[in-house]
Image (cartoon, rainbow, N blue to C red):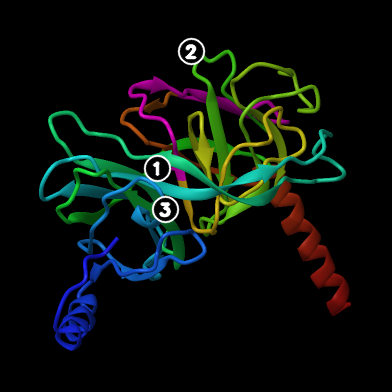
Amino acid sequence: MNRIVPMLGAVCGAAISTAAFGQFSESEPNDTKATPNIIGPVVHGSTLTGNSTSGSGVGLDYFRLDFAAEPLSIYRWTSTLTTNGTAGHAATIRGQGQTAAAAAPWMPGMTVGTGSGSDAAPQSSRIPAGTASRENAWYSFGHAYSLNYRVSGTASTTADYSVAFERTVVTPISAGTFQPGAITINSNGQGHTTDTDMWVYDSNFNAIVGYGNDDPSANSGGSVTSGAQAFMVRNFAAGTYYLAITNFNLANNQGSPSDDSFRTGTMLDFAGAVLNSSTTTNANVTFTISDAFGTSIQTAATKVGAFDIVWAQFTVVPAPSTLALLGLGGLVAARRRRA
């Protein structure tokens, strides 16, 4: 909800000039996900101000946050919502429900769930210790992307709210080098009982379709067929990959694959971002990556803070003997051409 302000022409002029510096203001109507304020480009240091005195109907403030492209990396974003008067505002990152894929082994069908289109909240804001503010957090990768965000209030939150956006760069841990082919990523039997959730990204930080798991099933194709600890077997070509692992729930815009036991988790509406819904801290998410040629490396990992995701980089390269054979084959082919 936005209060009516006189001198409309002057106000509009100010809004246009300040938006150029990443400072944005709420305007009505923005009471539903279908009619949000479109805000952007949001950058580190941007702010958003508005007013909400209700947790329903016209009191809801929906925003589509648009972020510009920047150098490829892993970025952790936070939005901090504060109130100038009586505290009581709350924020959620919005997404959608999921229509599950039919249960089946990943190969050969390679089917995934689809977004249901229903409005859902993959993450609700938390109150950091010693503050009255509300914080959300998520990750991005330098691609231009969008995120749906909602603020609600109460009858007592008559003063304006303000949201500050900040980001930091995340350095992934190293999880080893493996050979191409079937690779298993396993958080079961790693010295903890954390309900884990994970997804794999390619070298350009794009989520790979179907390369995620929340809970193993009889269709997982490996030694772990039940429980709440992520387990996945997939084929990997040579390249660099990034594993996002955390406790339940991890949400991006990808549907769960058919071999996941839990296939109805909430999804984000747009590509380019990923988040964790849990405020649990110091969660052990240690995992092991194994290839089909005998290499198996355990990586110790801890989700330290609320909404955190642990990022691990691993590489897939052919064995030296394979490279030598490829080189020899190329040499023979070259000699044949010359002959």
- Residue 221 in the image, given as x and y percentages of width and height: 79, 27
Indicate left or right for 48 with 140 as reference: left
- Residue 282 in the image, given as x and y percentages of width and height: 34, 22
Instruction: Identify which amino acid the numbered label 1 is placed on.
Output: Pro
Alpha carbons under labels 1 and 3: distance apart: 42 Å
Q: Quadrant of the N terminus?
A: bottom left
Instruction: Identify which amino acid the numbered label 3 is placed on.
Output: Gly
Alpha carbons under labels 3 and 2: distance apart: 44 Å
Q: Is residue 194 magenta?
A: no
Question: For residue 289, what is the image quadrant?
Answer: top right
Q: Which is nearer the N-term, disc 1 or disc 3?
A: 3
* Disc ID at residue 57: 3
Q: Is residue 45 visible?
A: yes
Magenta highlight range: 275-299
Say what secondary structure mark 3 lies in.
helix
Q: Is residue 298 magenta?
A: yes
Q: Which is nearer the N-term, disc 3 or disc 2?
A: 3
Judge by depth and name the residue closer to the eye, 86 or 130: 86
User: Where does label 2 land, which residue?
Assistant: 192
* Disc ID at residue 172: 1
Q: Quadrant of the C terminus?
A: bottom right
Q: Residue at x 66, y 46 (%)?
A: 255
- Residue 173 in the image, given as x and y percentages of width and height: 40, 38
Indicate left or right for 293 with 79 as reference: right
Instruction: Identify which amino acid the numbered label 2 is placed on.
Output: His
Question: For residue 125, what is the image quadrant?
Answer: top left
